[in-house]
Image: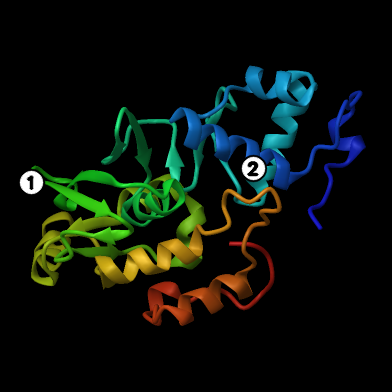
Amino acid sequence: MAAKFSLNELNDEISMVLTQSRLHYEVMKHFIEHAKAPSIDKLSVLFGLNEDCIIKALKLLQAEHGVVLHPVSNEVWVMHPFSAAPTNFWIKSDDKGWWGNCAWCALGAAALLDRNLTITTTLGGESKQVVIEIINGRIANKHLYVHFPIPMKKAWDNVIYTCSTMLMFESESDIDAWCERHNMHKGDVQPIEQVWAFSKAWYGRHLSPDWVKWTVQEATEIFERFGLTHSVWKLPSEGGRF
């Protein structure tokens, strides 16, 4: 069962029950339907709470790694797999477009959107552009790789930076050269189809009204299920959520 926010934390008259699951669901639903994050003002109207209460609720959700807020305005900056700010991953379907935070997120967003679409990015965040087509749930151009250089145990130290480094490449030798060029540690390298399958499982319940953030143990089990056994994917053994 999703934990309700404490009335002492919210400290205001509440017109409806507000849970982390419900807040996450409404923000995610808005991203998918409107291709942007809902404002604090819009969430205030939706939940019938003043803006201070909404900010407190969002901060509690952020503490569970369910959202990333702008450090000054407290507006929603990121709710994985979507970003409210421009990134190197542009997801397009018909007349709508979304930003994904990284290669993993862009594929996760494609899974959540569940429609024919394209993902436009640049290889290694440099000058060569590539367009990934996903048609009827299948990736049309499969000969790409995703590089994961940041250990997952450090991913949330600065998750915006972590996401910025998860990029697409055409070959492992290109990744080797890129790491040398940018003084970046080489991490795990996975074919795009493997990351596509993994992303569908990882983000599969992110639009559920009963969403709860993966525990460290659950995350570890998902990593192992998809053969993500490189040291990059090793998480600490203590509890908590990833």
Q: Quadrant of residue 192?
A: bottom left
The residue at the point 17 percent across, 53 percent down is 124
Q: Residue 215: x and y, percent?
A: 64, 67
Pointer 2 local density, CA inside 10 Å: few below 14, some 14–19, many at least 20? many
The residue at the point 64 percent across, 42 percent down is 25
Pointer 1 local density, CA inside 10 Å: few below 14, some 14–19, many at least 20? few
The residue at the point 9 percent across, 42 percent down is 127
Which residue has dot 1 on it? Answer: 128
Instruction: Let me know if residue 185 appears in the view.
Output: no
**First of labels 2, 1 by sequence position:** 2
Q: Residue 222: x and y, percent?
A: 51, 74
Q: CA distance from mark 2 to mark 1?
A: 35 Å
Q: Quadrant of residue 82?
A: top left
Judge whether 219 appears above or below 181 on screen: below
* Quadrant into which the N terminus falls: bottom right
Amino acid of disc 1: Lys
Which residue has dot 2 on it? Answer: 24
Instruction: Let me know if residue 156 appears in the view.
Output: yes
| Residues at marks 2 and 1 touching, judged by CB atoms closer than 8 Å | no
Judge whether 127 appears above or below 15 on screen: below
Amino acid of disc 2: His
Q: Residue 39: x and y, percent?
A: 58, 22
Q: Nearer the viewer, residue 76 or 184?
A: 76
Q: Residue 97: x and y, percent?
A: 33, 32
Judge whether 30 appears above or below 222 on screen: above
Q: Is residue 211 left or right of residue 117?
A: right
Secondary structure of the residue carrying numbered label 1: loop
Judge whether 146 appears above or below 116 on screen: below
Nearer to us: label 2 or label 1: 2
* Quadrant into which the C terminus falls: bottom right
The residue at the point 38 percent across, 45 percent down is 101
